[in-house]
């Protein structure tokens, strides 16, 4: 799966799934522009010969700056991997309005805002690919992750709506829904729930993202692909 010099944005790229995606895409020949709050993104970008922007995925000005820096550095953008952090957890009806609104910015509006910026550019180039890194709760909600489950389900809806609207323009949008991943501790009780008997490695999630970004997935759009070792029951 050769990126052939295509330019891709990766958000929340300094560690975990975001870092693994950046490393995989770099290995596949993509040129990258990386966004993260941590200064580690600068070191990673230096290692991968990428553009780095230190900022927040919930700040529209930082998203615009990421796109602007990518265009300034490479002259174009061909797609994005839209990854983010985790929302607040808690008892369902004890979560505050502020926590729900923060989750909306983090888990849904990030994709909406970046799509607004990128879509005209991708249309003018004749197409592109966008991949949202979501979570298994979008398919099978969990009371352990109430904000994430509800708003990532909404992200799945937006993914399908966007795909329907822009497929004819050659722009694809899909979502990857990881289960538990080894970038966070997974206790024995949780591990016992996973048919595969282990959490995913971040490079396994990155490989799925890379496939969806590639021409090998050229007829795949509007999909929410669960990568969870058999954890969820949906089919």
Image (cartoon, rainbow, N blue to C red):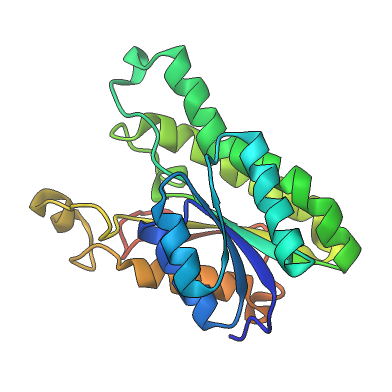
Q: Residue sitting at 52 percent across and 22 percent down?
A: 101
Q: Position of residue 62 (x, y in %)?
A: 62, 41
Residue located 30% across and 68% down the image: 201
Q: Between residues 228 and 41, which one lies in front from this camera angle?
A: 41
Q: Quadrant of residue 205?
A: bottom left
Report if residue 183 is visible in the image.
Answer: yes
- Which of the two residues, 6 or 134, is positioned nearer the viewer here? 6
Q: Is residue 133 above or below residue 77?
A: above
For residue 129, say whether it is visible: no
Q: Is residue 74 above or below residue 84?
A: below
Q: Residue at x 43, y 53 (%)?
A: 234
User: In the visual, does 199 lie left or right of 54?
Assistant: left
Position in image of residue 184 (x %, y %): 24, 52
- Number of numbered labels in the structure image: 0
Q: Position of residue 69 (x, y in %)?
A: 69, 55
Q: Position of residue 159 (x, y in %)?
A: 65, 49
Residue at x-position 30% and y-position 65%: 200
Q: Quadrant of the N terminus?
A: bottom right
Front in this rendered view, residue 202 or 160: 202
> Vertically, is 103 above or below 187?
above
| Residue 178 left/right relative to 64 | left
């Amino acid at each position: 799966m050769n990126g052939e010099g295509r330019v891709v944005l990766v958000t929340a790229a300094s560690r975990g799934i975001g870092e693994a995606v950046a490393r995989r895409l770099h290995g596949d020949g993509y040129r990258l522009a990386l966004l993260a709050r941590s200064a580690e993104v600068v070191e990673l970008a230096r290692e991968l010969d990428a553009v780095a922007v230190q900022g927040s995925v919930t700040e529209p000005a930082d998203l615009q700056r990421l796109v602007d820096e990518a265009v300034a550095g490479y002259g174009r953008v061909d797609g994005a991997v839209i990854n983010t952090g985790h929302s607040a957890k808690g008892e369902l009806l004890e979560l505050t309005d502020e926590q729900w609104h923060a989750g909306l910015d983090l888990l849904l509006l990030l994709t909406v805002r970046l799509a607004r910026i990128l879509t005209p550019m991708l249309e003018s180039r004749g197409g592109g690919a966008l991949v949202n890194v979501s979570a298994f709760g979008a398919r099978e909600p969990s009371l352990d992750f109430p904000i994430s489950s509800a708003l990532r389900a909404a992200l799945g809806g937006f993914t399908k709506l966007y795909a329907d609207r822009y497929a004819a323009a050659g722009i694809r949008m899909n979502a990857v829904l990881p289960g538990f991943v080894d970038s966070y501790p997974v206790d024995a009780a949780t591990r016992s729930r996973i048919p595969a008997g282990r959490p995913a490695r971040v490079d396994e999630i990155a490989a799925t993202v890379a496939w969806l970004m590639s021409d090998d997935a050229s007829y795949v759009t509007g999909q929410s692909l669960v990568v969870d070792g058999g954890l969820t029951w949906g089919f």
